[in-house]
Image (cartoon, helix red, strand yellow):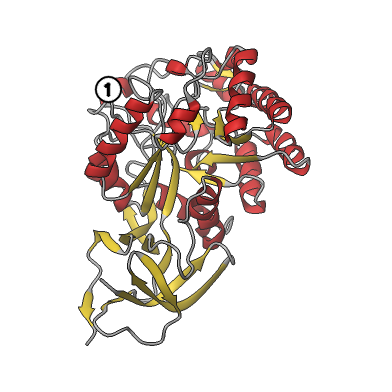
C-alpha cells in the first residue's frame, strides 16, 4: 500500500531541521520526501501541520518474558510502544531466567515477532546468569540475533573476568553495554547522598560511585578496544571522563533515561516509591549538566529505561521497593517538557531518541530520508492532557508522572509503512 502524508511538519534528526512537507511511503520504505502530489491510488493522510518524525528507537526496555509476564508481556509492551511513538524496542536480558543462551534468545525472538506490532531486537547477557563470572557464548548469541551484550545493573566485581569477556567481544565486533556504578558503594542504596537523603534517613550512594564505575569501564575499553556504550550517565562528575574518552578516539557512546533528564532527587518527596530509579535520581545541578551534555551531543542517547513493576513490589517502604518506572508511553510527552522549556529542539530530541541509537546498533531506522524504513510517528507536541496511569497500555502502572499535566500526544505510529496506532483520517487518491 502506498501512503501519502501531506502537510506535515518534518523533523529531520540528521540535518537537525524542521520544515513543512509531504512524504510518500511505499513498500515499507520512505519513497519520496517533498512530493507535490499524491501518487495515483495512494492513501492520503492530512497531517494538519503536526510533527512527523522517525519512530523512536527505545534502547533498554525490560519485558517480563520469560518469568515475569504478569508485569509486562511482548503484546502489552508492543501496544504501549505503538501508543508512545516507539517503533523499535531494544529489549534487555534481565529476565527470569536471564537471556544468556542462543536457545532462550531464539525463543523470545519468536514470541516477540508474533505478539508485538513494533520491531523488537534483543540484547543478551554478557555473562552467564548476569553474575559477572563466566562469559556467555557471545559468538553463538550473535548468530542467533543478539544486537548487543549487557548484564544490565548487575555490575561485575571481578575485573579480570570482565576484561576477558570484553576482549572476546572485541574479537567478534560485539557491542557491550555497561552500567557505570561502583558495585560496592552502590549496593543497597536507594537515593543519591546529600542533605535530602540525610533528612529522610534513606540509604544513599555518592555520585562518585558512577564516576568510579565509568573510570574502570573506560580503562578496560582502552585496554581491550571493545565497542562500548554506557547505559546511563547521570552525574556532572562523569562528563569530563566521557569527553576525554571520546576525544582520545575510544569507541564509546553514552545514554541517559528520560527520568534523569526531567526529574531530580527532591521529587522523591515523602518516600514516593514511583520515583525510585536505578541509578537514583540526582541533584538539580546534575540534571542540568547532563541535559547540556545531551544538547552538545556528548551524551548520545535518550531512552525510557522502561522497567515494569507490579503494585506489590512498589507498595513497600522506600528502601525495599522495586526500582524503575514504565515509560514506553511517557517517553515522548516527558521529552516535550525539554522542548517546551527551550532546553532541546525537536530535532535534537529525535537525534537522541531515534537516529543515534539506530546508528550505534547498526539499524537502518531513525532517519527521515528517502530509502529509509517507513517507521514514523505523527504527534502534536502542544496537545495537553492529564496522565492517568490506569489508561496506560502496559500491564504495570508504575509511572512517576501519574496525575501530572503533560503535553505531547501521539496521533499515529507507522511501522514499515503500516499504521499500527492511531486513527489518522485517510482517503484514497484517484
Q: Position of residue 117 (x, y in %)?
A: 26, 50
Left-right relation of 35 to 12: left
Residue 376 point in image, percent of width and height: 38, 62
| Left or right, 326 with reference to 424 | right
Q: What is the quadrant of the N terminus in the image? A: bottom left
Q: What residue is shown at x 45% (from left), y 25% (from top)? A: 125
Q: Is residue 337 visible?
A: yes
In the picture, residue 161 is in which quadrant?
top right
Numbered disc total: 1
- Give the class, few, some or many, for how many residues have Cα within 10 Å of label 1's Cα (few <14, many ≥20): some
Residue drawn at (48%, 34%), measured in percent from left and top? Answer: 267
Q: Residue at x 49, y 67 (%)?
A: 11
* Vertical order, 199 against 9 (above or below): above
Which image quadrant is residue 328 in?
top left
Q: Position of residue 295 (x, y in %)?
A: 63, 53
Residue labelled with disc 1: 67
SS under mark 1: loop
In this orientation, which residue lies closer to the viewer: 212 or 375?
A: 375
Residue 206 spot, x, y in % from top left: 63, 21
The residue lying toward the viewer, choosing from 68 and 272, is: 68
Q: Quadrant of the C terminus?
A: bottom left
Amino acid at each position: 500500500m502506498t501512503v501519502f502524508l501531506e502537510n506535515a511538519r518534518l523533523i529531520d534528526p540528521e540535518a537537525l531541521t524542521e520544515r513543512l512537507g509531504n512524504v510518500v511511503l511505499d513498500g515499507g520504505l520512505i519513497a519520496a520526501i517533498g512530493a507535490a502530489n499524491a501518487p495515483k491510488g495512494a492513501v492520503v493522510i492530512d497531517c494538519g501541520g503536526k510533527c512527523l518524525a522517525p519512530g523512536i528507537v527505545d534502547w533498554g526496555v525490560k519485558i517480563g518474558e520469560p518469568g515475569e509476564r504478569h508485569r509486562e508481556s511482548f503484546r502489552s509492551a508492543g501496544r504501549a510502544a505503538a501508543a508512545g511513538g516507539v517503533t523499535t524496542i531494544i529489549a534487555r536480558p534481565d529476565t527470569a531466567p536471564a537471556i544468556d543462551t542462543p536457545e532462550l534468545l531464539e525463543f523470545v525472538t519468536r514470541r516477540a515477532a508474533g505478539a508485538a506490532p513494533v520491531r523488537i531486537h534483543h540484547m543478551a547477557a554478557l555473562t552467564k546468569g548476569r553474575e559477572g563470572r563466566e562469559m556467555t557464548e557471545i559468538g553463538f548469541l550473535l548468530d542467533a540475533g543478539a544486537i548487543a551484550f549487557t548484564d544490565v545493573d548487575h555490575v561485575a566485581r571481578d575485573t579480570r573476568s570482565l576484561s576477558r569477556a570484553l576482549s572476546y567481544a572485541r574479537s567478534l565486533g560485539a557491542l557491550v553495554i555497561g552500567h557505570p556504578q561502583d558495585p560496592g558503594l552502590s549496593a543497597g542504596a536507594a537515593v543519591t547522598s546529600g542533605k535530602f537523603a540525610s533528612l529522610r534517613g534513606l540509604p544513599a550512594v555518592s555520585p562518585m560511585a558512577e564516576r568510579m564505575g565509568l573510570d574502570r569501564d573506560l580503562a578496560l575499553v582502552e585496554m581491550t578496544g571493545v565497542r562500548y556504550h554506557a547505559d546511563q550517565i547521570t552525574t556532572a562528575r562523569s562528563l569530563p571522563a566521557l569527553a576525554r574518552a571520546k576525544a582520545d578516539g575510544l569507541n564509546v557512546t553514552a545514554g541517559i533515561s528520560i527520568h534523569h533528564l526531567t526529574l531530580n532527587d527532591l521529587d522523591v518527596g515523602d518516600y514516593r516509591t514511583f520515583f525510585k530509579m536505578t541509578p537514583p535520581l540526582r541533584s538539580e545541578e546534575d540534571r542540568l549538566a547532563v541535559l547540556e551534555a545531551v544538547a552538545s551531543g556528548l551524551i548520545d542517547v535518550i531512552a525510557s529505561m522502561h522497567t515494569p513493576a507490579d503494585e506489590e513490589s512498589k507498595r513497600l517502604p522506600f528502601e525495599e521497593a522495586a526500582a524503575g518506572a514504565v515509560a514506553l508511553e511517557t517517553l515522548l510527552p516527558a521529552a516535550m517538557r525539554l522542548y517546551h522549556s527551550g532546553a532541546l529542539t525537536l530535532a535534537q530530541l529525535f537525534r537522541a531518541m531515534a537516529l543515534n541509537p539506530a546508528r550505534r546498533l547498526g539499524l537502518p531506522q531513525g532517519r527521515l530520508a528517502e530509502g529509509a524504513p517507513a517507521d514514523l510517528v505523527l504527534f502534536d507536541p502542544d496537545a495537553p492532557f492529564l496522565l492517568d496511569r490506569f489508561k496506560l497500555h502496559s500491564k504495570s502502572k508504575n509511572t512517576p508522572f501519574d496525575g501530572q499535566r503533560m503535553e505531547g500526544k501521539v496521533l499515529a505510529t507507522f511501522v514499515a509503512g503500516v499504521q499500527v496506532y492511531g486513527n489518522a483520517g485517510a482517503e484514497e487518491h484517484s
